[in-house]
């Protein structure tokens, strides 16, 4: 299940919480997604969908593939050879042939971090950027591109059931309150980690030129 569907289903996990830690109060245009509906699903997305697209692609993988890119973590990475630390983040530089089983292990271990990997098999592919965007910068709507099996359509487009050729999806985060639990208010680092963001997400779908909007209140 992609992270936006989890938010709308009230199922935010640790990865989503980590994403939202990056935002202060204010309004942000994030999580852009374009889906072209052909023989496969042709996708362009912003950074926020990188982990989800990786997870979708490895579901049907039957043989080893060459994988390149980065895994970026705020926790030490010990199971790859080429790892360096940049400020508070660890980066594993990946250029290796991995089995489907190994890729699933990588996802399970790093799904709450940043999986910025690229690979392809058959007519399916994923290409990810490798430089994490800053919250205040202009949204890069083509950070990831992918060709996916059509079975994943209703995961990505969970709130629209009619046929379409192309849909452009944008999300406006409006964070109006940051709630710090009382027990962490006197510890800056624990306050940062445990604070929750409250606000709304406006989900805007432009489906073959027709606009559909949904709004979700959240506490993450």
Image (tube, rainbow, N blue to C red):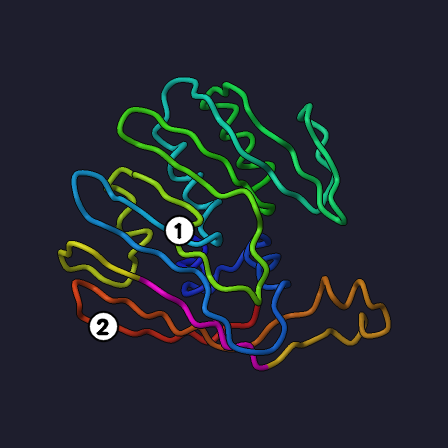
Q: Residue furthest left?
A: 163
**Residue 66 placement, left or right of 84:** left
- The residue under label 2 is 211
Q: Is residue 218 above or below residue 65?
A: below
The image shows residue 192 at horizontal and vertical percentages of 74, 66
Mark 1 to mark 2: distance in Å?
A: 21 Å
Out of 25 and 56, give the one closest to the viewer.
Answer: 25
Find residue 65 and report its image quarter. top left
Q: Is residue 175 magenta?
A: yes
Bounds of the magenta span?
169-176
**Main secondary-structure element of the magenta-colored stretch:** strand
Please tell me whether mark 1 sits on a helix, a strand or a loop: loop
Q: Quadrant of the C terminus?
A: bottom right
Residue depicted at x 54% and y 21%? 96
- Near mark 2 (Cα within 10 A), the count class, few <14, some 14-19 or many ≥20, is few
Please tell me whether mark 2 sits on a helix, a strand or a loop: strand
**Residue 74 placement, left or right of 62:** right
- The residue under label 1 is 142
Q: Is residue 160 magenta?
A: no
């Amino acid at each position: 299940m992609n992270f936006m569907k989890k938010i709308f289903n009230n199922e935010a996990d640790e990865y989503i919480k980590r994403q939202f830690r990056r935002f202060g109060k204010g309004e942000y245009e994030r999580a852009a997604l374009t889906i072209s509906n052909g023989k496969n699903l042709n996708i362009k997305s912003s950074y926020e969908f990188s982990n989800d697209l990786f997870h979708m692609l490895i579901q049907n993988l039957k043989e080893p593939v060459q994988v390149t890119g980065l895994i970026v973590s705020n926790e030490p990475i010990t199971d790859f050879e080429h790892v360096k630390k940049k400020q508070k983040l660890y980066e594993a530089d990946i250029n290796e042939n991995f089995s489907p089983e190994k890729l699933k292990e990588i996802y399970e271990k790093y799904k709450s971090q940043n999986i910025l990997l690229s690979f392809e098999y058959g007519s399916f592919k994923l290409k990810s950027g490798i430089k994490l965007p800053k919250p205040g910068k202009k949204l890069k709507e083509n950070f990831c591109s992918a060709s996916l099996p059509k079975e994943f359509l209703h995961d990505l487009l969970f709130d629209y059931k009619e046929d379409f050729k192309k849909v452009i999806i944008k999300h406006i985060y409006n964070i109006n309150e940051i709630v710090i639990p009382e027990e962490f208010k006197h510890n800056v680092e624990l306050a940062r980690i445990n604070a929750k963001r409250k606000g709304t997400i406006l989900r805007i779908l432009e489906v073959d030129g027709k606009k559909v909007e949904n709004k979700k209140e959240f506490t993450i």
